[in-house]
Image (tube, rainbow, N blue to C red):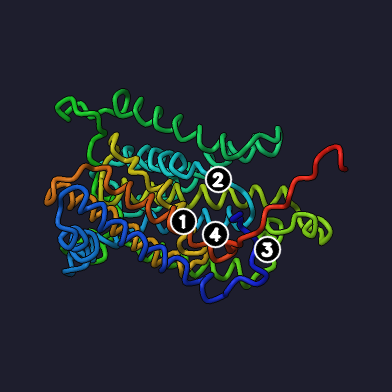
Amino acid sequence: MLKLEARPQPSQFWSYGSPLLALVCTVVIGVVLFAALGKDPVRGLQVFFWEPIRSGYALGELVVKATPLLLIALGLAVCYRSNVWNIGAEGQYLVGAIAASGIALTADATTGGWMVVPVMLAGIVGGMVWAGLAALLRDKFNTNEILVSLMLVYVAVQLLGYLVYGPWKDPAGYNFPQSKTFEAATRIPRLFEGSRMSIGVLIALLGVAALWVFLFRTRSGFAQQVGGLAPAAARYAGFSSRRALWTAFLVSGGMAGLAGALEVAGPIGQLTPYVPAGYGFAAIIVAYVGRLHPVGMVFSALLMSMFYIGGELAQSRLGLPKSITGVFQGLLLFSLLACDTLVNYRFKWTRAQPKVAAGNA
């Protein structure tokens, strides 16, 4: 009989190499998938892994899509290292975008460039409030934060729809469900002329450094992680599990809300029904492929960004459906889970024990 048993000491090399192995598995399965769909596998891989980096402009677009993914993943890493399961970052991202849009829509042609700061702060506060709802229900009523945070995503989507189809609908927008275009003073400054990269890239990199210092160089970060790994030890050491819960949710919500603010006030420039791009869910994969480490998540965010861009190019150049992006994201996640399982467990053949008759017992 074949069964799984835990390895006495999992390989450190393969523990860190598991994401790379998962990527190789994803590529191999992708080749089979392209062939099954009647497409040239070489051309398919080229669209996903070469086209997004073939020029300076393409690299800029890669970074533009990686920025919100990285910001959200940084916040989720705090949650998951604390054993707090926030699955609703997409909703916090949307509410952050809505809050930032509300501030941006108050600006006019005479507003100064200082308006960018309130727009970003509004996004942070919006995301924190939405995440705080899940934290409050978990703290006061011991609800399941997975279900609550996930259900709040759909509430946020309905709120977005109400606003863009209702009070915030642009009267001069030819009946399209979108807000008016934000004033130039509220738009996130770009880094280079001719590129869509904004200062959001620098903010994300600062977030990487700040999270590394918090997790690995501060007592608060140590307490946050101990609470997730060993709750009993955390209580014995005097660390507050309640504080860890609120810290995890508020940091995660704030980062997701900031990502939403940077998106609507940056590349998009207005609030539309298409703001929900699945970044909040994709960032979960980014966090785990990056091993919940700030530096690792930089590379996994770029990889996930390649999947987004590759999926868009596959639609226009190969005639594949939009869902191909989600397929590759799912392949990467399941490959990672399979590789992690084999790193920590091994298959072992065991001989079935003979059954003893009841009368002979």
| 305 horizontally vs 154: left or right | left
Residue 99 x %, y %: 41, 39
Q: In this view, does 15 lie above or below 328?
A: below
Identify the disc placed on residue 341.
4
Crowding near the residue tagged with mark 3, few <14, some 14–19, many ≥20 C-alpha atoms within 10 Å: some
Residue 284: which numbered mark, if any?
none
How far separated are the C-alphas under marks 4 and 2? 23 Å
> Disc number at residue 220?
3
- Label 2 sits on residue: 86
Task: Give amino acid for label 2.
Answer: Asn
Dot 1: element: helix
Side of 313 relative to 201 (left or right): left
Q: Kindly identify the amino acid type of the residue bearing the numbered disc 1.
A: Ala
Work out how far the residue at label 4 is from the one at label 1, CA to CA, in angstroms.
Answer: 22 Å
Mark 4 secondary-structure assignment: helix
Q: Where is residue 311 in the image (x, y as percent from the top left)?
A: 24, 51
Q: Nearer the viewer, mark 4 or mark 1?
A: 4
First of labels 4, 1 by sequence position: 1
**In the image, what residue occupies the spot 73% across and 50% down?**
354
Q: Which of marks 3 and 4 is nearer the N terminus?
A: 3
Of 113 and 182, which appears nearest the observer? 182
Q: Which of marks 1 and 3 is in front?
A: 1
Q: Distance between the residues labelled 3 and 4?
A: 31 Å
Which residue is pictured at 48% across the width and 62% down the height?
Answer: 339
Look at the numbered discs 1 and 3 and tell me whether their residues touch, using CB distance below 8 Å. no
Please, is residue 45 above or below residue 120 in the view?
below
